[in-house]
Amino acid sequence: MEHPIFFLQQLFDLFGPKAAHFAHQNIHVIYSWLVMLLLIVLALLATKGISMIPTKGQNIFEIIIGGMEEFIVDITGEEGRRFFPLLATVFIYIFACNLLGLIPGFFPPTAKIDTTLSCALVVVPFTHVIGVMYHGPKYIKHFLGPIWWMAPIILPIELIGHTARVLSLTIRLFGNMAGHELVLGILFLLAGAFFAPLPIMTLGIFVSLVQAFVFFLLSTMYFAGAIEHAH
């Protein structure tokens, strides 16, 4: 369910019919660009005044980033630190996309399955890259089972299971964010644009955080599984 007016669509309409067509057909793309721009600016501002004696703003960012890093290490071990930039970026990007939908006139990119699928296609294949990095060709044995003659049975099951990871990450995030947009749209139509949606929008902040965290947590667990020596 869409908001009545999307500001970026209106802006693209000013640049001619081709730009307008692109914006209307790919609204999740243009709002993804906005999220990326905002995160880049925020990162530049956050790192501009780094000092040995931290300011209040620096303290807040250090607590958030440090807490995320320690959480990853608790699950994956020390080896997980090298994958912290990717996991943290995924979490922050998804959380920012989710929050964007709470602002009237803005569309959350995660309410389109294209966005959530693209995030899942970054995380899940990279899981296997990690497996090969740490275990070499022996990683393939994980898909073949403990006994060679069981390979024709185990291999299809493993392939289905890893494909299901992509679907799980994609559909869970997309379904929750699209559902939230639908509820907001119904309330806008039935009870006005100001009062009725406020409780749902407040709940939406919590939903945005939880959905980003679930994606982040599952991604971290997939990485931890690929690192384990059990493979």
Image (cartoon, rainbow, N blue to C red):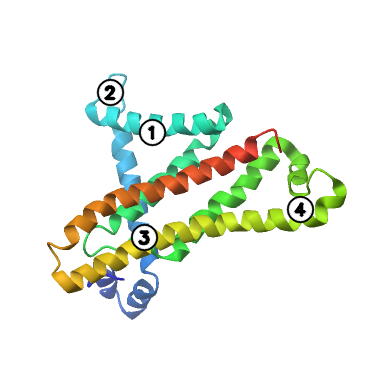
Residue at image coords 52%, 45%: 219
The residue under label 4 is 154
For mark 1, give the secondary structure: helix
For mark 3, give the secondary structure: helix
Residue 134 relative to residue 40: left or right: right
Q: Quadrant of the N terminus?
A: bottom left
Sequence order check: which comes first, mark 4 or mark 3? 4
Q: Amino acid at mark 4?
A: Ile
Which mark, by number, is residue 54? 2
The residue under label 3 is 177
The residue under label 1 is 65
Residue 16 spot, x, y in % from top left? 30, 78
Residue 89 spot, x, y in % from top left? 43, 44
> Is residue 30 something that shows in the picture?
no
Residue 20 spot, x, y in % from top left? 32, 76
For mark 4, give the secondary structure: helix
Q: Looking at the image, is 21 positioned above or below residue 3?
A: below
Kindly report which numbered mark, 2 or 1, lies closer to the viewer in this rendering. Answer: 1
Q: Say which quarter of the image contains residue 67.
A: top left
Q: Say which quarter of the image contains residue 10.
A: bottom left
Few, some or many residues within 10 Å of mark 2 (<14, 14–19, 20+): few
Sequence order check: which comes first, mark 2 or mark 4? 2
Q: CA distance from mark 2 to mark 1?
A: 14 Å
Q: CA distance from mark 4 to mark 3?
A: 35 Å
Which mark, by number, is residue 162? none
